[in-house]
Amino acid sequence: MAVPGSSRRQPSNRGLVSHCTHHHIVVFLLTFFSYSLLHASRKTFSNVKVSISSQWTPSCLNSTTFELRPNELWNSNHLFPNAEEATLFLGTLDTIFLFSYAVGLFVSGIVGDRLNLRWVLSFGMCSSALVVFFFGTLTEWLHFYNKWFYCCLWVVNGLLQSTGWPCVVAVMGNWFGKAGRGFVFGLWSACASVGNILGAFLASCVLKYGYEYAFLVTASVQFAGGVIVFCGLLTSPKEVGLPELGADEEGSVEEDANRPLMGDDDADDDEGNYSIQAADTDSQPKAIGFFQACCLPGVVLYSLAYACLKLVNYSFFFWLPFYLSNNFGWKEAEADQLSIWYDVGGIIGGTIQGLISDVLQKRAPVLAISLLFAVGSLFGYSRSPNSKPINAVIMAITGFFIGGPSNMISSAISADLGRQDLVRGSSEALATVTGIVDGTGSIGAAVGQLSRN
């Protein structure tokens, strides 16, 4: 039996290629690498935790650090009496970052729908780069160690970093319609994993000179990326005279192209006459409110699901290199490089699962099956032997079944939710909906870090 509505959806798949221009490619690459750079600077902190812990504790009590001379000068600067307290504070910083990041996502989504997305994104990138530089590089150069100063900087960094995801998803949603969205966004959502790989690579390359240089390199590259985004990013097709999504299509094809792949067709038909936005004569669409966005079908449910998923995903993100180094006794640079395989699995998982969801024309079944396999992969990884090849393989499998669904919810499904029929004519729902989904997910991740502490 044919999938209901499949005959209407086929023409939109052909439109994916016919409507793609060089502007689409530039937007894809700029948004991809802009968020990759944000994630690279974020990943740097987790990749150098062992070095930071060594620097913040007396060398005479820390067997993992190099002997520092003069000993009197070093002992006068240490923050914590032992490595355990330093590790606890590092976890506290993770929690602080995630809570501020979550709050910032709710606000940034609303701001992104009301201001120019390019301005918001470039401001967040450049400002966050400066905060990362102050946190990891300037304080070490000045030998200024203060717990409250670190906490304040990481709160600000979380707020600034939150401008990234709602803006890039909204820009991508403005340029790419429902045709093949699962595959396009699945491939594009690898930006976070690529950023993790880039951050791990940069940190491992300069870590031998001191952890402050890892922060310096990633902050510099991120700042340069923010300048490039400000100068070159096009936030919507109308900026270059191209028709907006749906403007050049008529009939049921476009109506179906903006329909999310989460509910059944009968439910969609029942709600077809309802609009969350009152009709008006203004040609410029208005952004919907925060509570209106929360009332959209699927937003709350997928937000709660993403909160549970991101809790697990960010536990790997923040602590995987630290876990490998401490549990197996591997060198920090080796642990950083090995942790890349988790992100490789996430890249492959997001792309393949997004493509499968396009073929099935449903997202939820793909997510459910993947998460069932994720339980088994987590159990297997918890019993991984002290073997780098075996660990890497199991890690990649785990990333496939955890990182893949995480990428789908935060990108393709968020775009589906923000472009569904109920907000047709208002593209300014994309950033708000994305902020709600990712913000709720970040709260779940923050709770996970808090419980770990």
Image (tube, helix red, strand yellow):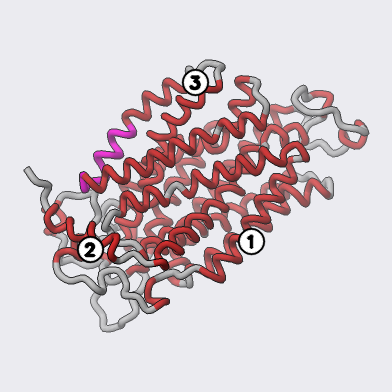
Residue 129 visible in rendering: yes
Of all residues, the one furthest to the bottom in this rendering is 281
Quarter occupied by residue 277: bottom left
**Residue shown at 36% from the left, 44% from the top:** 351
Residues 331 and 379: in front is 331
* Mark in front: 2 vs 1: 1
Magenta span: 360-371
> Which quadrant, please, contains the N terminus?
top left
Percent x, y of residue 290: 38, 62
| Residue with the mark numbered 2 | 421
Mark 3, secondary structure of its residue: helix
| Residue with the mark numbered 3 | 390
Q: What amino acid is found at the position of numbered circle 1 in the picture?
A: Ala
| Residue with the mark numbered 1 | 224
Left or right: where 40 falls relative to 142: left
Badge 2 or badge 1: first in the primary sequence: 1
Q: Is residue 365 magenta?
A: yes
